[in-house]
Amino acid sequence: MQVPKTKSTRKRTASGLPEHEAALFRDAVRGATPLESSARVEPRFKAPPPVPIQSLLDGHDALVESLAGPISWDQSMETGNEASYLRSGLARDVLRKLRRGHWVVQDMVDLHGLNRQEARSSLAEFLGGCLKRGLRCVRVVHGKGLRSPGREPVLKGKVQRWLAHRDEVLAFCEATRNQGGSGALLVLLKA
């Protein structure tokens, strides 16, 4: 049914509805009884804030790691933002050869999506397996942090530190672009 547009139908109510629609609604709910107000009780005290257990554990682990001390300049050499490490006593030529692909990557581990503890144990297990199989060159993918809070890599620095403190690691450098770039490391292991 089309209501003719007259001056009275163009008027709007306080709710913004046209007058004729508001009248239809009032007619439809004329015999309805309003619901009683809820007997809901509001809590007297606010719930305590959640305890950030994982943050506390990460802080504790960071403290334990810091006690190991920083890596000396002889052990690592940073060139710009590219991560690299060379065990003291080895010729710098080893790192250059690793960067240029002298050794073929024989296996890899992907640490994407793992938390700190899972990543550390997964890396240790992977390196142990590589030693048992006699592998020399492997790739460790830690990610670029594009999906991390602040778009910064969470595992990148930690993986570098973990690798630098392992006896079986002779050297590592940032992977080439086609092998993961800044989201991965090429690692040279003891023979």
Image: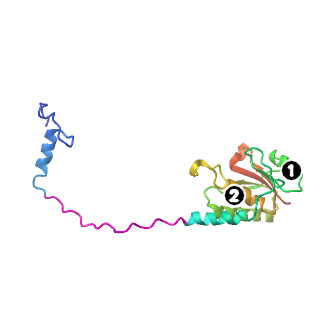
Name the quadrant containing residue 54.
bottom right
* Res. 180 visible in picture: no
Foreground label between 2 and 1: 2
The region drawn magenta spans 33-52
Q: Residue tagged by mark 1?
A: 94
Query: What is the x, y in percent for residue 107?
Result: 75, 56
Query: What is the x, y in percent for residue 175?
Result: 74, 47
Tell me what residue is drawn at x 89 percent, y 56 percent: 89
Relative to 59, say whether 140 is above or below: above
- Residue 123 placement, left or right of 27: right
| Amino acid at pointer 1 | Val
- Residue 84 placement, left or right of 1: right
| Amino acid at pointer 2 | Lys
Query: What is the x, y in percent for residue 162?
Result: 73, 60
Q: Residue tagged by mark 2?
A: 158
48 is within the stretch colored magenta: yes
Q: Look at the numbered disc 1 and give the secondary structure of its residue.
A: helix
Query: What is the x, y in percent for residue 148?
Result: 58, 52
